[in-house]
Amino acid sequence: MDDLSPRQIELKIHGLTQEDHGRVPARVFANKLKQLVGALEAADAVANGKVVHQYVLASMHMSEPTAILAEIPIFDEDDGATAIAVFSDAVEGIKTNDQRVKRLSAVVRHISHLTSGVESQFGFAEVRTAHSNVIRIDDFLRKRATRARQASKGVWFDGAVFGSFDGTIKVVDVRGSLPQFKLTLSAGGKELDCVGKREDIEALGNALNHRVRVHGRAIYSSSDPLPVRMEVTSVDAVKAEPDFTRWKGAFRPFSASSWEGDA
């Protein structure tokens, strides 16, 4: 994995299934790259009052369709602020549906286009910035972007809070930098969509079909009382219920038939 500078951004597209994750139609890849550039140009206009940068190809990889873009000034004397930070800020605003959505509405609209076709034309995408920060472009973000562009809200809380949930890990998808898994909640049995960290893949595999407690940022939609996604920072195994069979009979009520001779 190439180290990125603060003025670089990477797009990687994954196929529809784990078996063909490297097979992505060229038209789809080109379209998503175009939409990412459009989002960056909109962010550039927000950051600098006008578009002062262009985005050029710095590198490409074919094993998994990947392109690295470099942000360079159109005019040497006008470097300006980077649009990449504004782009990332807009994504966070979409996730939590906060005031950034209105302020960065032009960027949000382009990000919404970037998510179109997910799970129908491609599996998901990843946008990586400096310091290995990864944004997952998937059906979750598509739905959040659609909701962010709507004025109405439901009756439930809409936003993000840190918390924990108890349940059993049932499905793990290890593709990409942010492995996705399903947590079947111990209370109620409903499924919670979760994404973890790449370095936790081994721990997630070991925890498959076992009860765990996950900690992280829970993102809620106003249409449902449960989170629509959990961005997991840690996974702790929950100890199995203790086995008291070897103590069978030891806790039965005790009564002495006679105390004679015990004095």
Image (cartoon, helix red, strand yellow):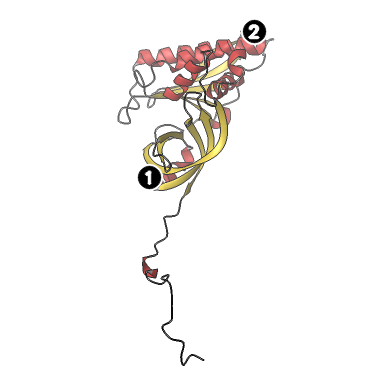
Classify 45 as above or below 180. above
Of callouts 2 and 1, which one flags the residue occurring earlier in the amino acid sequence?
2
Residue pointed to by mark 1: 208
x%, y% of residue 4?
55, 27
The residue sitting at the right extreme is 77
The residue sitting at the left extreme is 19
The amino acid type of the residue labelled 2 equals: Phe
The amino acid type of the residue labelled 1 equals: Leu
x%, y% of residue 252?
41, 71
Task: Count every numbered label the image shows and give the total.
Answer: 2
Question: At x 30% / y 30%, what residue is drawn?
Answer: 19
Q: Nearer the viewer, residue 121 or 64?
A: 121
x%, y% of residue 166?
46, 44
Classify 249 as above or below 152. below
Indicate the quadrant where residue 71 lies: top right
Question: At x 34% / y 27%, what residue is drawn?
Answer: 21
**Is 77 positioned to the left or the right of 94 in the image?**
right
Q: Is residue 110 visible?
A: yes
Between marks 2 and 1 in the image, the one whose residue lies nearer the viewer: 1
Q: Secondary structure at mark 1?
A: loop
Q: Categorize mark 1 by other alpha carbons within 10 Å: few (<14), some (14-19), many (20+).
A: some
Q: Categorize mark 2 by other alpha carbons within 10 Å: few (<14), some (14-19), many (20+).
A: few
Indicate the quadrant where residue 75 lies: top right
Cα–Cα gap, marks 2 and 1: 53 Å
Residue pointed to by mark 2: 75
Q: Nearer the viewer, residue 157 or 105?
A: 157
Q: Secondary structure at mark 2?
A: loop
Q: Is residue 73 visible?
A: no
x%, y% of residue 179?
43, 35
Classify 125 as above or below 166. above
**Is 42 positioned to the left or the right of 238 in the image?**
right
Q: Nearer the viewer, residue 144 or 7?
A: 144
